[in-house]
Image (cartoon, helix red, strand yellow):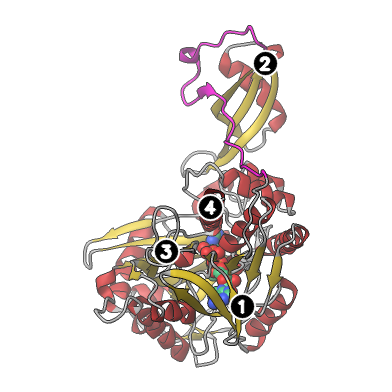
Amino acid sequence: MRWIRLDGLAQALDESEDVLKEQAARALGISVADVCSVTVIKKALDARRNKPPHFVYAVKIGLAEPVTVLPEAMPAGIRMQPFTDEPAMDLSPVSSSERLPVAVVGSGPAGLFAAYVLAIRGLPVLLLERGRPMEERTKDVRTFWEKGVLDPQSNVLFGEGGAGTFSDGKLTSRTKNPYAGWVKKVLVEMGAPRAIMTDAKPHIGTDRLREVLIHLRRKLLDLGCEIRFGAQVTDVIIRQGAAAALVVNNHEEIQADRIILAVGQNADDTYGMLNKRGVKLEPKPFAMGLRVEHPQSLINSIQYGRWSNHPRLPAAEYFVTADVSDPNRSVYTFCMCPGGQVIGCSASPGLVVTNGMSNGKRDGDFANSAVVVNVRTDDFMSAETPLSGLDFRRHWERKAYLAGGSNYCAPAQRLTDFVAQKTSGTIGRTSFLPGVKPARLADILPSFAADALCSGIKIFDKNMPGFISQEAHLIGLETRTSSPVRICRKADGQSENVQGLYPCGEGAGYAGGIISSALDGIKAAHGIIASVSGRR
Ligand SMILES: Cc1cc2nc3c(=O)[nH]c(=O)nc-3n(C[C@H](O)[C@H](O)[C@H](O)COP(=O)(O)OP(=O)(O)OC[C@H]3O[C@@H](n4cnc5c(N)ncnc54)[C@H](O)[C@@H]3O)c2cc1C
């Protein structure tokens, strides 16, 4: 059998995948009998406006050996190439005489996948997480959303699964990293839907993601990984330029000469400790803005037009960008959650931070997305500290807290009023919990951001007519798009100035999002495996 990949097979919404075989044969100009097998590799929805939405497939095809295909005779838009498998992940045991387990700090995607790779290769692993396990964390988060009572160690940002647990569970990533498919395969083994392997825009949803994470924990335990929750790393002991030990919860010293630091971008206290210990850090650009929320039905009708009620169409998504000339900034939407909910995700007392999540079915009444402006390092840079981006972020999040009424409700404004720069004082229904308070959002943003958002949103409305709607709200603040700090590291993954310390994931400043953070964790694990193997 000869294997090829065929890209660009289009199907109308009402067509069934059963006819892909005939379609492939037609496109290749061969008989159906010569197509021995068809497997979907990728399925995308093409919903560009003014033409009927349709699905576009990439498929793996097994051809009967002697058949001849003439690529030049294929219809426009269809491409053929030899099929190549993704490189397999090396899961073979590593024999090591290492005395100490590898310490992995943080159980977000980076820490979990680092721990998984190390444990599956047979290395002893100690996973330390400041927050609580999923079952307890879910209750803590519910208490916060329902009553506004924040637990600074167990919340939307801290706890088992990391920051993306109460999320849309989008698994999109622009990376060409060959292990992205393996990460998704592991997630499927842990209970994620199989469709994530083939959907062009895969997502799990927070409801199913929480289950997946519990299964991943059990798998790690089976592999011999020791997991400790409620274990905040409060200090790193460095001797002669090398990691020597960790201090947990200010009192327990644990020897560790190989540490994967996967603490995410939300642990300001941990960044502060690393800075005090002389670990090299530097400021980096990030983005900030607001969450915008529309009725999902409105977004469906903007995006799908007269097909908006078609039962095979998912809740519509969008991604819009605008280059604003005055002030000279980029404005873009980010982390869109169709059928989702805007959520409060404070981890520190006295700050309001927003984000979005949705369930697997994405069947909520609202569509939300971050709408953000790029923040440059010279917007906040200080000669005294590499951590000024964190101070800058906290400053604006504090303003949001005060404007929301100092009880974790978020300040909100009708989109029409924000764009018209007027204070109406009234707002309609939003999904945000624990609640919203009418406010003038321009007052809780740096002026460059407020101005750029106002201009950028007007440009969005030209590209997506109806985006500026009386029914839409802005809720603030959205500040955790990526880290404003980088933990500098060398090509081998180790900190630039502390041997044995492997910063990775979003908090290290080299990744963003669930998949890319998981991949960065794997890279750190591979760095450790290489060093352990080299030492033998
Ligand atoms: C609400 C929300 C929705 C999101 N939605 C998506 C999405 O749909 N798709 C997507 O790709 N990305 C999404 N993201 C972003 C994504 O979650 C992050 O990029 C990703 O989780 C980063 O992974 P990480 O492992 O590097 O860090 P994190 O996930 O932040 O994990 C870090 C972990 O370290 C722990 N920790 C911190 N300090 C210490 C310490 N000192 N000692 C011990 N433990 C510590 C924290 O408690 C945390 O569990 C979302 C983020 C949020 C907040």
- Specify the segment rendered in magenta: 64-92
The disc label shown at residue 495, or none: 3
Q: Which residue is mark 1?
A: 130
Q: Earlier in the sequence, mark 3 or mark 1?
A: 1
Q: Nearer the viewer, residue 29 or 378?
A: 378
Residue 94 is covered by the magenta coloring: no
Q: Earlier in the sequence, mark 2 or mark 1?
A: 2
Distance from Cα at disc 2 to Cα at disc 3: 48 Å
Q: Earlier in the sequence, mark 2 or mark 3?
A: 2
Distance from Cα at disc 4 to Cα at disc 2: 44 Å
Residue 342 visible at all: no
457 vs 20: above or below:
below
Q: Amino acid at mark 3?
A: Ser
Q: Amino acid at mark 1?
A: Arg
Q: Earlier in the sequence, mark 4 or mark 3?
A: 3
354 vs 439: above or below:
above
Discs 3/1, front? 3
User: From the Cβ of disc 1, is ligand 1 less than 8 Å away?
Assistant: yes
- Residue 514 position, x and y percent, is 55, 58
Specify few, some or many for label 2: CA neighbours under 10 Å numbering under 14, 14-19, or 20 or more: few
Residue 196 visible at all: yes
423 relative to 146 in the view: left or right: left
